[in-house]
């Protein structure tokens, strides 16, 4: 198995797919189409990244052009740390 370790202030993200239904209901989420939702999970990070941890759910900027790669048969993104806007915390 190969491991990808981003360099410097970069992160490897697996995009989070939008929920098909709104949480706790049977109402269809109109954003669950093929549109990007700009959320993803941190899979790996460069050694200069301190603000996020592996496993964090983050919101990243819609205006960036991430590097798209395939890792373990699934699409992933490599982004710079400055492209991450927020960490999503469930309360």
Image: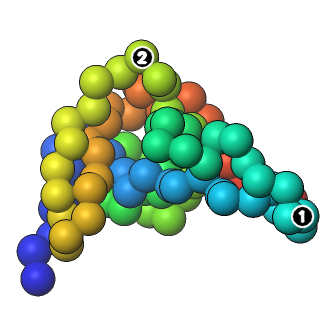
Q: Position of residue 15 (x, y in %)?
A: 43, 52
In the image, 45 versus 65, the foreground residue is: 65
Q: Residue at x 89, y 64 (%)?
A: 25
In this rendering, position of residue 54 left or right of residue 89: left
**Dot label at residue 63:** 2
* C-alpha distance separating marks 1 and 2: 32 Å
| Figure check: 20 above or below 83 | below
> Label 2 neighbourhood size at 10 Å, few (<14), some (14-19), many (20+)?
few
Task: Choose mark 1 or mark 2, whichever is in front.
Answer: 1
User: Could you tell me if the residues under marks 1 and 2 are in contact, i.e. CB atoms within 8 Å?
Assistant: no
Residue lying at the far top of the rendered structure: 63
Q: Residue at x 28, y 53 (%)?
A: 76
Residue lying at the far bottom of the rendered structure: 1
Residue lying at the far left of the rendered structure: 2
In this rendering, position of residue 36 left or right of residue 85: left
Q: Position of residue 10 (x, y in %)?
A: 28, 40
| Figure check: 37 above or below 13 | above
Q: Secondary structure at mark 2?
A: loop
> Label 1 neighbourhood size at 10 Å, few (<14), some (14-19), many (20+)?
few
In the image, 31 versus 74, the foreground residue is: 31
In the image, 22 versus 58, the foreground residue is: 22
| Figure check: 53 above or below 88 | below
Q: Position of residue 29 (x, y in %)?
A: 73, 48
Q: Position of residue 73 (x, y in %)?
A: 19, 70
- Point out the image quarter for the C terminus: bottom right
In the image, 2 versus 20, the foreground residue is: 20
Name the residue carrying label 1. Answer: 25
Splitting the image into 4 quarters, where does residue 81 fall? top left
In this rendering, position of residue 89 left or right of residue 83: right
Q: Is residue 51 visible?
A: no
């Amino acid at each position: 198995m190969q491991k990808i370790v981003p360099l410097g202030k970069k992160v490897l993200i697996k995009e989070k797919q939008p929920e098909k239904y709104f949480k706790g209901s049977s109402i269809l989420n109109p954003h669950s189409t093929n549109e990007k939702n700009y959320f993803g999970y941190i899979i790996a990070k460069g050694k200069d990244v301190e603000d996020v941890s592996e496993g964090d759910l983050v919101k990243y900027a819609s205006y960036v052009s991430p590097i798209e790669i395939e890792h373990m048969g699934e699409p992933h993104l490599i982004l710079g740390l400055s492209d991450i806007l927020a960490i999503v915390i469930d309360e």
